Amino acid sequence: MSYLGRRVGFYLVTIWAAITINFLIPRLMPGNPVQLLIARLQGQGTLSTRAIHALSVAFGLETHQSLVAQYWHYWVQLFHGNLGLSVTYYPSTVVNVIATALPWTLALVGISTVIAFVIGTGIGILAAWRRGSWLEAALPISTFFTAIPYFWLGLVAVAVFGVVLGWFPLSGGLGQGMAVAFNGTFISSALYHAALPAVTIVVTSMAGWMIGMRNMMVTTLGEDYVLVAQAKGLSERRVMMTYAARNAILPSIASFALSLSFVVSGAILVEIVFSYPGIGYVLFQAVQNEDYPLMEAIFLIITLAVLVANFVADLAYVFLDPRTRQEA
Amino acid sequence: MTGTGRETTRGAARERGSARWEARDGARRVTEGSPGGIVLEIAGLCVDYGDGPDAVHAVVDVDLAVHRGEVIGVAGESGSGKSTLAYAATRLLRPPGIITGGDAWFYPEAGEASSRLNLLDASAETLREIRWAELAIVFQSAMHALNPVLSVEVQLTDTLAAHRPEMSAAARRERAGELLEMVGINPDRLSSFPHELSGGMRQRVMIAMALALEPQVVIMDEPTTALDVVTQREILEQVIELRDRYGFSVIFITHDLSLLLELADTIAIMYAGRLVEVGPAKRLFRSPRHPYTLGLLSSFPPLHGEVRALSGIPGSPPDLRRVPSGCPFHPRCRFSLPRCGEERPQLVAVSADGERRVACLLHDGRQSPPAELGNPDAGSVPVAPMAAWGPDGPDRSLPPLDDTALSRPEEGVTPHA
């Protein structure tokens, strides 16, 4: 399909541009990570010039190399899956740091985002279908929660359910001294620790989906084909889902794909508030420690995630809306 | 003896029922000029938009009977309430439309009052069963009447699935193909989506969809308005051909009276939410009785016969929030009498056979109507003497459609207010 071919070509060019910019920006900035690391290690005794040179090589910052040579080197390393060493978590590699943190974020923020979308959209559909019912009253209430900054809601949740009531843990993703293992105790402990941050994310992001879907539904319900479906004597459920919601959901798909791509960057503030061991928390640490290799890698992953999510959204549109299948 | 008699009647009814279902093979034809019993009877229907004192009375006390196999045309300017009438009768009216009075009787066995059913009281489930199976609608804008994300096949077969659950998926698919063929579309277009079809094809798909379950009544709400004249002609010919083959009744709503003259058996003219004239198409054309009908007829050139000046109708349709007192048409009427602004005319029969009805004071017998409105009725029956009406105004020489319906206190509506 030439439509897909064109889309793939577009994404390849975009990825190239993103990686190139990602390579250039830190090199255009003053200072470099080696100097930071030197400053950090200085406390443990002075470093020899040879040690400094070794660090420069390790971080790919040999100044005598031309920019073009560095760029080439960068691509080679990238294809080897080598994103350098982390300053913050030295001597761990950036890849290791991300590989440890990413699953936590994907599970917590990913699942919460999907839950928020499903519940919000579902309530939106029903609220539009039953205009004037109590569900419409849910709209202003959930808007209120959207207006509250989610990190603040997180703080309140920690204070009330963690500190005062003691129902939920205050921080972390796992119980003390537990290791990642796929057994019952691990999963229940992980769920227990994820409950508060997940609820915070769901409650604050649900209303957006709800209002968007409800408004689109109300517009769609005014369409002739919905009236036709009713005149056809179809069941209420089929009219609501296949005729109204099926069309009304199309605009939501793009924003859902976009929000899924931001799952990778994590809900930074939520992860900070709950000290959750995800990417958002790692990014926060990286920024505080001026950990350029780590930041660079995280930004690269976020960029890729946005592109992948957009591509998936494009595919979803082709699948959901026959009008996009038309060759332009 | 009585027992067997009842058995026979029931058996005959069953036979009639199955005949309808076989009719898709072309077995049933309606004999020209002899419409069957009533299938749909709208009685005293009133529809408001909005509530309270600001309500707009979009349809006021409309009585209309649709006979089996009849094409009844409803004509009027924009905002005259013709579409509202059709949507209200099928209970598809959307808020803020409210049915404030009247009945819409559906006769499953044409003409048999015992089995009739009031669509306006029917439960949601009964209504769902009758919709499309007996009462189908072709909407004005074919562009928007088809769901853009479902294929033609899905949209044709989901109707069958909803009403004929016993049909297998393969049988439904086959029937969908037959339906497309019936309206002159190649069955391989089943997998097409609406945006891949032309406007004319979409409207044909809508017509095929309307006929999927062999309904008794098909309401067509300006089905050809969005189409060019050639396509319009083709579609109308197809509708008439299908009507002749399957014998369904058509309520054809349009603002184009010239279309109705070729198409309809009976024409009903609406103005400001009221019926102002009803009669057989040819007789109404040759001898209009209401000044508004005359105006509509003078608004388009005749295809045959002598050329005459087009006059049109001065003024514009009334604002339904401020309907003129008396006859709502009187400010635009060139024949209006002083009392037209005070007395509201009722729709009464003006021919001896009762087939022609008009709501106009010019015909109440107190004066002879102007020459333009007094052409001899083309019908075989001589015009009834108007002077027979009593001093209290005309009595309704048409048999009242349903006395109980008109005087039900719980409706809270005074008919002919």
Image: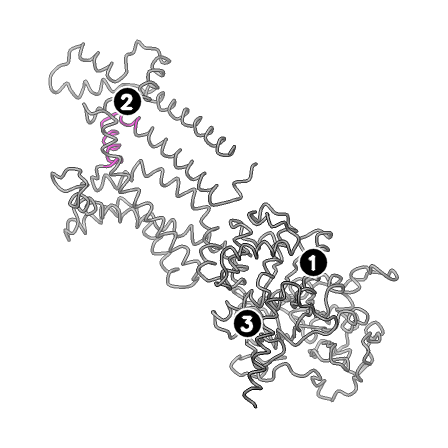
Q: Is residue A211 above or below residue B125?
A: above
Side (left or right) of B96 relative to B381: left
Q: CA distance from mark 3 to mark 2?
A: 73 Å
For label 3, the residue is B99
Q: Are marks 3 and 2 on the same chain?
A: no
Magenta extent: A278-297
For label 2, the residue is A82
**Residues at badges 1 and 2 in contact (C-beta under 8 Å)?**
no
Q: Residue at x 48, y 34 (%)?
A: A4
Please state the chain letter of the residue tagged with numbered disc 1 in the rendered image.
B
Quadrant of res A106? top left
Residue A143 part of the magenta segment: no
Give the x, y percent position of residue A205.
Answer: 33, 47
Q: CA distance from mark 1 to mark 2?
A: 71 Å
Q: Secondary structure at mark 1?
A: helix
Q: For this rendering, which residue is in front, B232 or B161? A: B161
- Which residue in the rendered view is the most extreme toward the right? B306
Q: Secondary structure at mark 2?
A: loop
Within-10-Å neighbours for mark 2: few <14, some 14–19, many 20+: some
Q: For this rendering, which residue is in front, B107 or B143? A: B107
Label 1 is placed on what type of residue?
Gln
Quadrant of res B38? bottom right
Q: Residue at x 72, y 73 (%)?
A: B278
Give the x, y percent position of residue B232.
Answer: 71, 55
Q: Earlier in the sequence, mark 1 or mark 3?
A: 3
For label 1, the residue is B238
Residue A287 part of the magenta segment: yes
